[in-house]
Amino acid sequence: FASVTCIVACGQVVTAPAADSETMSWESFDVGAMQAQRQGQNVNFLTVLDDRRFRMGLLHVPRGTGTGLVVHRLNAVYHVVSGAATIATDTLALVVGPGDAAFVRGDVEHIIRDVTDDLDLVVVFRIAQLSTADPDLVAFTRDQMVEGISEEESVFNLLLSTTTVGLGMYTVPKGTDADHLMIHPTAELKIVAEGTSRFDVVEGGMRVDPGSIAYIPSGVQHQFRRVADALEVFVVWER
């Protein structure tokens, strides 16, 4: 790749969030609603969360196009909702499809190309200092992410642990009445890839289906219950 200096987040300039923008309570999102809102605003990238820890949005790349070279200056996690493409640096090219995930270090030039089907990606940016100890680019297929799942008990697969962010897949079997009650010391995003259940958060909660996303700040109690269809939950947390 030719040398390019562009500080962008999927077409948007990356800026520090306002001092009062930190999310103080849990929030929920729905990919279907995000897709409709993005289309209504006629933009390629829709931001739905922006606080001191994470920035999250939906990126749309039409079939037959690409992003051009980008350098985010923030570590980025891609989760493929639909479509297929190649994420490439100057030394590595990885093909991704529905359910797959990828991590790109914030100072690494990369491009999304060879988009064979309209591509929708949930993009999570981790707002933290970069480290060259982290990988340039790494991707995980859905099959890799759910390897070793059980029909008897919940399983957590650790996929990646960098200096700023962790990635994992959490699966909960069909028929689970009440899963583990969880409280974490760091903030996290839970992206439901498959399954249906109730998701309780403190004294509230929601029904979750494929495309449901929950942002859980540190110290907030949460639990999956009444799992009607086996859950596959992609988890991104701060480190």
Image (cartoon, rainbow, N blue to C red):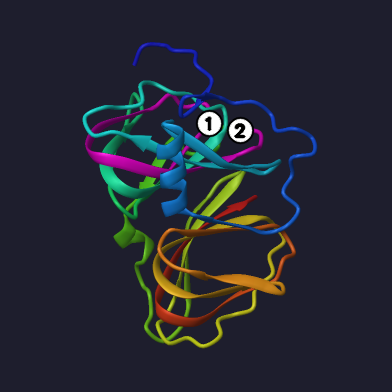
Q: Which residue is mark 1?
A: 106
| Residue contact between numbered discs 2 and 1, judged by CB atoms under 8 Å | yes
Instruction: Report x, y in % for residue 91.
Output: 33, 27
Q: Secondary structure at mark 2?
A: loop
The magenta stretch spans which residues?
103-129
Residue at 53 percent across and 31 percent down: it is: 106
How far separated are the C-alphas under marks 2 and 1? 7 Å
Instruction: Report x, y in % for residue 179.
Output: 55, 81
Residue at 31 percent across and 49 percent down: it is: 82
Residue 167 seen in this snapshot:
yes
**What secondary structure prevails in the magenta region?**
strand
Residue at 34 percent across and 55 percent down: it is: 99
The magenta stretch spans residue 114: yes
Instruction: Report x, y in % for residue 238.
Output: 63, 50
- The amino acid beneath tag 2 is Leu
Q: Which residue is mark 2?
A: 130
Give the mark, 2 or 1, whose residue is nearer the N terminus: 1
Instruction: Report x, y in % for residue 143.
Output: 30, 61
Q: Nearer the viewer, residue 188 or 93?
A: 188
Q: Is residue 191 left or right of residue 116?
A: right
